[in-house]
Image: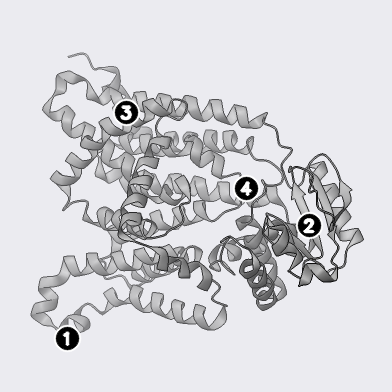
Amino acid sequence: MKKSFLDILIQYTESHASLILTLILISSGILIFFTLDNGHAPGGDFAVYIEQSKAIISGETEDLFEVNRFAMDHSDRHIGPYLYPVGFPLLLAPVTRYFGMNFVVYKLLLLLFFLFTGGVTFILFRDRFPYKLWALLIVFYLLFNYYFIAYLDFVLSDIPFLFFTLLSVYLLERYRKTSNPWLQAMMGVVMFIAFLIRTTGIILFITLILIHLHDDWGMIVRKKIRYLYSTWYRMIPYVLFVIGFVLMQILYIHGEQNHIDLLQAATLPLIFSNLLFYLSEIKKFLILYYPDLSIIVLILSTPIVFAHILMNWRKDLLYLIFIFGILGIYAIWPEREGVRFIFPVIPFYFYFLLKGLLDLHRRFPKWHLRAIPFILLFMIFVQGIFYSYRDFFQDNSANILAPESTEAYEYIQTNTRKDDLFVYWYPRTLRLMTGRNAFSTKDPVRMLNSPADYLVTFREKPFDHPQFNLMFKNKDYSIYSIVRNNSSNQ
């Protein structure tokens, strides 16, 4: 009987999976490398991460905490925490130490973690399918997906967090019952690193607890205290995680108080709204160019995904606990951050989708459902290439290292004092680039009643007010000195 092309492809990938994986990683790495910009889009999160890496090296974390707390507390909108978790700044610190504030090297570090993510994705899923081809497809879906590629141009913690969470899930699945204390220790350390990068990594610790109870509940009930003696090695991840948590509280400043306070605004309608929002964001990883079509694809794929989950939830319980935990945390978080929050969910979505399609193929072989994953591969590949090519030639004038930005920052450093206070929409970026603290507001009265000395605007209309004197102007930036009289402070 003549073999089909797919059968030949399956046979070839079985014996050459490592080679194909390597080619996927190399080609993706080359594509992404040419999309990386030297510099950064204006924002703020990246600035604090870099500032924290500098503070770790210089031992000035407490000083950074104080100046950023001032900036956050005096801004009239919520911008971010006083300090971020220390994990990602620690990863950036060697780059900052040996290369200075080098955005290309920062982004190459993120690219390295992204390629590692591709490798972990393959080993996580390869034994879950009858053939390695399907695990390789998931790797391809991730490494050539435009949204992952685009976020590698931002110095943010999303990609390292994705790597350490997937690695943690792999170790949990593979070694959670092993009697090897070193493997148990590795599991605890990797989970704690994920937690150090993002506090939402606590869901990995919760997942470990729940899956442990599910695996051994009968033995725990039967043996009680004797269970701890007979399976002492299973306690190693817990002990290491708790020790790491205690040491972190002692050795590093906890700077997320104002961030966590936002949870007070969580309501039941908001939680359901956020959950639907994040689930609907999955469509962006399917078809980007035609939003309406992407919604249709998501709607059509959802029953396939849920059908597989319902029929195989026991086999996939570990994955489901982790996914529902991640989505649950972001559902109760009042502020929405878009697609990057669901990065850890996307590999599992593709896994459930492929498993569901293969389940259907076994029931309806004449429908040729195994062709759908390759259609999806083609769409993701074309989109990844097209948008990466577009980004390569995009307008980069908003970059903080663009000539207009550099000119404005140099003017500030040359013509103002280090203790002068600024008003700027991106206060953390201004502080990183000039060493001057700032806070954010658009209200002139608030500016005049504050201790601010200067106002910086970026691509805004001229600020027409008698107590704001224009000092500097170029195509993008305007800098005003704030002149106060007695009446303005009354």
Label 4, secondary structure: give it.
helix
CA gap, disc 1 to disc 2?
Answer: 65 Å
Residue 356: percent from left, percent from top: 21, 36
Q: Residue furthest left?
A: 222
First of labels 1, 2 by sequence position: 1
Q: In the image, residue 85 lies at what x, y percent? A: 53, 68
Q: Give the vertical position of 229 relative to 68 (above or below).
A: below
Q: How far apart are marks 2 and 3 (CA)?
A: 47 Å
Q: Distance between the residues labelled 1 and 4?
A: 49 Å
Does residue 333 appear left or right of residue 250 in this picture? Answer: left
Q: Do the residues labelled 1 and 4 touch (CB within 8 Å)?
A: no
Residue 296 badge = 3
Badge 2 element = strand
Q: What is the crowding at mark 4: few (fewer than 14 residues within 10 Å), some, or many (at least 20)? A: some
Q: Mark 1 points at which residue?
A: 225
Q: Where is residue 22? Give x, y as percent.
A: 47, 38
For marks 4 and 3, give the one nearer the viewer: 3
The picture places residue 268, in percent across and down from the top left corner, at: 30, 59
Cα separation, mark 3 vs mark 1, equals: 54 Å
Q: Residue at x 86, y 45 (%)?
A: 473
Name which of mark 3 and mark 1 comes first in the sequence.
1
Residue at numbered disc 4: 108
Question: Which of the two discs, 4 and 3, labels the residue nearer the N terminus?
Answer: 4
The type of residue carrying mark 4 is Leu
Select label 1 or label 2 by which is in front: 2
- In the rendered image, the quadrant that contains the N terminus is top left
Tell which of 61 and 368 is nearer to you. Answer: 61
* Contact? badges 2 and 3 (CB < 8 Å): no
Q: Which residue is drawn at 63% across and 48% down?
A: 107
